[in-house]
Image (cartoon, rainbow, N blue to C red):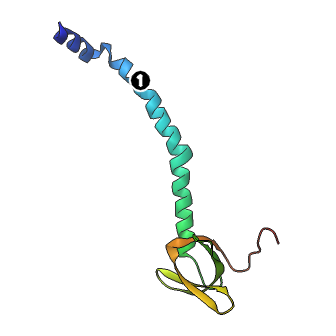
Amino acid sequence: MDSLMFLAAATGTGGSAFFVQIFPLVLIFVVFYFFLIRPQQKRAKEHEAKINAVQKNDEVITGGGLMGKVTKVADDHVEIEIAPNVRVRAVKSTLANVSPRGTKAAND
C-alpha cells in the first residue's frame, strides 16, 4: 500500500503542489536579489572604483575616522596629512570616503 502512495505521488498528482510550495521561496529570492543583493554589489563596485582612483590632494576619511589630505599614493597604501606636518600611512582598503580636490563640504 505504501508503494502505491509513493507511485501515485511520483506520477504527478502531487507535482503541481510542489511548484506551488516552491514559488513563494523563488519569489522571495528574486525580491531579495533586486532590492538587497544587487544594489549592495553596485555600491561596493562604486566604492572600489573610488578608492582605486584616489589621487594626491584628495580629501579622505578612513574607517577609523581620521580625516585629511592625501600627500602620496602607492599601490596598496596612501599617506594622509591629518594636521600640518603630521602624516600617517593608511591602507587603501580602509578608506571610507574620498572627496576629489576642490569640492566643498556640505555645511560650507
The quarter holding residue 105 reads bottom right
Q: Nearer the viewer, residue 92 or 9?
A: 92
In the image, residue 54 lies at what x, y percent? 58, 78
> Is residue 62 rendered to the left or right of residue 107?
left
User: In this picture, is 59 found above or below 106?
Assistant: below
Residue 101: give x, y in percent of width and height.
Answer: 69, 80
Q: Nearer the viewer, residue 97 or 18?
A: 97
Would you call the spot at circle 1 few (<14 residues within 10 Å), some (14-19), or many (20 or more)? few
- Residue, x 74% and y 75% (percent of image)? 103
Q: Is residue 98 left or right of residue 17?
A: right
Vertically, is 71 above or below 1?
Answer: below
Which residue is drawn at the image coordinates 53% and 44% (left, top)? 34
- Quarter holding the N terminus? top left
Looking at the image, the residue that sits furthest to the bottom is 85
Q: Amino acid at mark 1?
A: Gln
Up/down of 99 relative to 10, above or below: below
Name which residue lies at 62% across and 72% down.
65
Q: Which residue is mark 1?
A: 21
Residue 58, x across and y down, in percent = 65, 80
Left of 90 or right of it: where is 12? left
Expressed as whole percent of the image width and height from the top left, the position of residue 36 reads 54, 47
Name which residue lies at 50% across and 85% down.
74
